[in-house]
Amino acid sequence: MSLVEEARKVRERAHAPYSGFKVGAAIRARSGRIYTGVNVENASYPEGTCAEAGAIAAMVAGGDTEIAEVAVIADCPDPVPPCGGCRQRIAEFASGEVPVTMATLAGATLTRRLDELLPGAFVSAHMAR
Ligand code: THU
């Protein structure tokens, strides 16, 4: 199954009763393993989490820390872009050339490198002294 299809499948489990906007994310780690996540909203709105954050948490808990590829999908007119915070979360575990595929339920896709989505990312190297 393609990474977009993995994201499409897991999206159905999103907990999005407040926005009604279900998002699914899938990550292929350098190990080849696939990790998925969904947005999990909360009655206390700021406590909700994005699908990408869930997939990253699953990846780290699964023992992987290197992202090879990302896919995100939602039911929207244009391929869903990861929010700014999630671009930074992805950058913690991915190099700039990593492809991020954004998709719609209707079948549109758009693939961009991470460094196109988040140019000039703040990374741990910036804290080296
Ligand atoms: N959302 C994601 O899961 N990922 C994104 O990158 C964009 C936004 C979720 C958060 C919230 O549950 C819903 O979409 C509406 O913002």
Image (cartoon, helix red, strand yellow):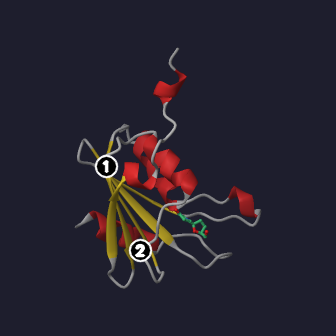
Q: Looking at the image, is mark 1 or mark 2 earlier in the sequence? A: 2
Question: What's under tag 2, amino acid-wise?
Answer: Pro
| Rendered position, 77 above or below 34 | below
**63 or 47: nearer the viewer:** 47
Ligand 1 sits in quadrant: bottom right
Question: What's under tag 1, amino acid-wise?
Answer: Val
Measured Cα–Cα span from mark 1 to mark 2 = 17 Å
Q: Name the residue rendered at 70%, 56% in the picture.
A: 47
| Rendered position, 94 above or below 110 | above
Kind of element beneath mark 1: loop
User: Mark on residue 98?
Assistant: 1
**Residue linked to disc 2:** 79
Percent of width and height locating residue 24: 45, 67
**Is residue 36 rendered to the left or right of residue 121?**
left
Residues tagged 1 and 2 counted as in contact (Cβ below 8 A): no
- Image quarter (top left, top right, bottom left or bottom right) of the N terminus: bottom left
Percent of width and height locating residue 59: 40, 45
Q: Name the residue rendered at 54%, 23% in the picture.
A: 127
Q: Quadrant of residue 111?
A: bottom left
Q: Name the residue rendered at 32%, 73% in the picture.
A: 109
- Asked if the residue at label 1 sits under 8 Å from ligand 1, the reply is no
**56 or 112: nearer the viewer:** 112
| Rendered position, 13 above or below 116 | below
